[in-house]
Amino acid sequence: MKLDTYFSLRDIVLMSLMAGLVIVLRLALRIPMHLTGKSGLFWVIPIIVCVGITQKLGTGTYIGVVTGILAVVFGLGSSALDGFNYLVIGVALDVLCFFFKGHLDNLFVGILIGAAGHLCKLLSNSYLDIVAGTPVEVVLISLGYAAILHAVFGGIGGGVAALVLGRLYRSGVVKKHER
Amino acid sequence: MELKVKIALATAVLVVVIGALVGLSYLASNSAAPTTQGKASGTFREADFSYGPQAYVPYFSRLPVTPGSDENGGNKYRLMFVDLNVSSRQGGSNTNPVAVEYAFKNLAGTAVFHVYGYNHASSNGGGVAWTNRAEGTGASGFSVAGSPGSPLPAGPAVVDNHQYVRVAGQSGAAHDDYGNGTYLLNFNKEGGGLNALHLSTSPTGAGEVTATASQSGTFYVTTDSDNGFDDLLLLVGVNSTQPPGFELWLNASPYSARP
C-alpha cells in the first residue's frame, strides 16, 4: 500500500490543515476555566471531523504526527516529549473511529470517541511525568479527578464533532460511506 | 457487531477505566498520609502562593529569601505558608526531627523553603515566633531549581512581621487561636527565635543551605530548642510565573529512626 495511493492529495492537504488547526486552537483559544483537560473541549474536534471526512484508517495518526511536530516547533508544553501526547491521541482516535466506522455522525458515538481519546492523552501525559521523575504516588493522587474532567471535556468535543459531521453528510458536502 | 452493542461495550470499558483511575487516586491519597501525628500536607498550585512578590521572608527585621540576596532588591518571590500540622514533641523528646517529602511538577524558576515554629503559649506571647536563620553563621535553607522561568507580575499583599497569615490548602490552620483560621507572626525582638529551627538533608543535621535541581526528595526540619514546638509552618517561595500543570506535593511526618 503506497501512501500516495492510499491518501489522495485532497486527503493529505485536509489532514495537514487540520493538524495546523489543532495548533492554532491550542495557541489562540484561552478558556478562562482553571480546570485540567479543558483544552480537549475544542481540539479533538478537527481530528474526529477529519477522520469522518477521509474515512480512512491512519488519518488520526497522520494528524497526530504533524501536530506533535508543530507542537515541538512552537514550544507548546514543557518539553519536546509533550509532542508524543499528540501522536497518542491521534492513534487512539484513529482506532476508535475505525471501531465505529460509518457511525461517526452519531452523537453518542462522538461523545464516546472524544472522551476515550482524550483520556488516552491523559494517560500518555501521566506516563511521561513518571518517566521525567515525578513520583508515581504524586501522579496517581491527581489522576482520578483529571480522568473525569478529561473524559467530560473530550466527550463534549466529540459530541460537537459528531454534530458537525452529521451536518456535512446531510448537506452532501461529504459523502458518507455506509458499511 | 451492532452499533448498540459497540456503544454499550465502549461505555462499559470507559466507565471501568475511569473507575479504576479514581480508585487508584483514592488509594494513593490515603497511603500518602502518615498514621501518626502529622498528615499529608497536600498538593498545591500557583494560585496558593497568595503573598508577595517580595524579596524578603518575614522576621523581626526582614531576612533575605536566599543567602546573599538583597531583602529590598529585585529578586522577588511569591510566597505561601503551609501548615505541616506536626509537632517536634514526639517519643518523649521535644526536638524530634520532622521529615518533609516534596515533589514538584513543572517547576519554573527557583523554589525556596523556610520554616517557622508555632507555640500556643510561651513567655513571648506565643504564636509563630521561631524560624531558621536565612544567612550567616548557622544559616539553613533548601532550594530547588526548575526550568528557566519568566518574571513575576505585580502581586497581592506582601507579608511581614506582626501580621495574621493564612495557610494554603483545604485543611486550613490546625491551631485557630483567633477564630479566623490564621497564625500571628510574632517576632518581638531582634535575634529572638532566630536559628531555633534548621533545614537539613539529614535528620541529625544542624542545618545547612542546600540548593538542588532534584524535583523530588526529602529534607528535614530539626531543632535544638529545649521547649519544642506545637506546630511547624513551611514557607514556600517561587520566583517565577509557573506554567499550566505546576504542582507541589508535600508530605510531612515525624521522623523515626526505627524501621
Image (cartoon, coloured by chain):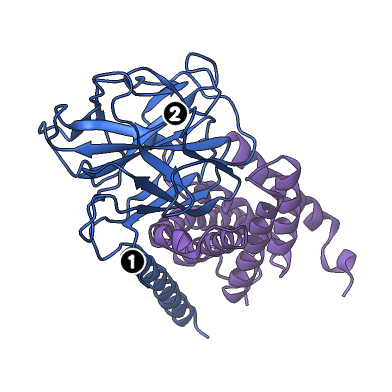
Chain colours: A purple, B blue
Q: Residue at x 69, y 55 (%)?
A: A81
- Residue drawn where x is 63% and y is 77% of the image: A179
User: Which residue position is annotated with label 2?
Assistant: B78
Amino acid type at image mark 1: Tyr
Query: Quadrant of the image for the N terminus of chain A?
Result: bottom right
N-term-proximal mark, 1 vs 2: 1
Q: Nearer the viewer, residue A16 or B189?
A: B189
* Residues packed near mark 2 inside 10 Å, few (<14), some (14 to 19) or many (20 plus): many
Q: Is residue B187 above or below residue A48?
A: above
Q: Position of residue B52 (x, y in %)?
A: 41, 23
CA neighbours of label 1 inside 10 A, class few (<14), some (14 to 19), many (20+): some
Q: Is residue B92 left or right of residue B135?
A: left
Q: Are marks 1 and 2 in contact (CB under 8 Å)?
A: no
Along the line of sight, which residue is nearer the eye, B229 or B54? B229
Identify the residue at image location x=28%, y=38%. Answer: B117
Q: Please, which chain is the residue tagged with disc 1 on?
A: B
* Residue A169 appears in view: no
Instruction: Choose mark 1 or mark 2, whichever is in front.
Output: 2
Q: Secondary structure at mark 2?
A: strand
Q: Which amino acid, by three-letter code, is at mark 2? A: Arg
Residue B26 shows which numbered tag?
Answer: 1
Q: Secondary structure at mark 1?
A: helix
Is B64 positioned to the left or the right of A98 in the image?
A: left
Residue A134 drawn at (x, y percent):
54, 57
What numbered label is drawn on residue B96?
A: none
Q: Quadrant of residue B182?
A: top left
In the rendered view, would you say A47 is above or below A70? below
Residue at 80% x, 55% y: name it.
Answer: A12
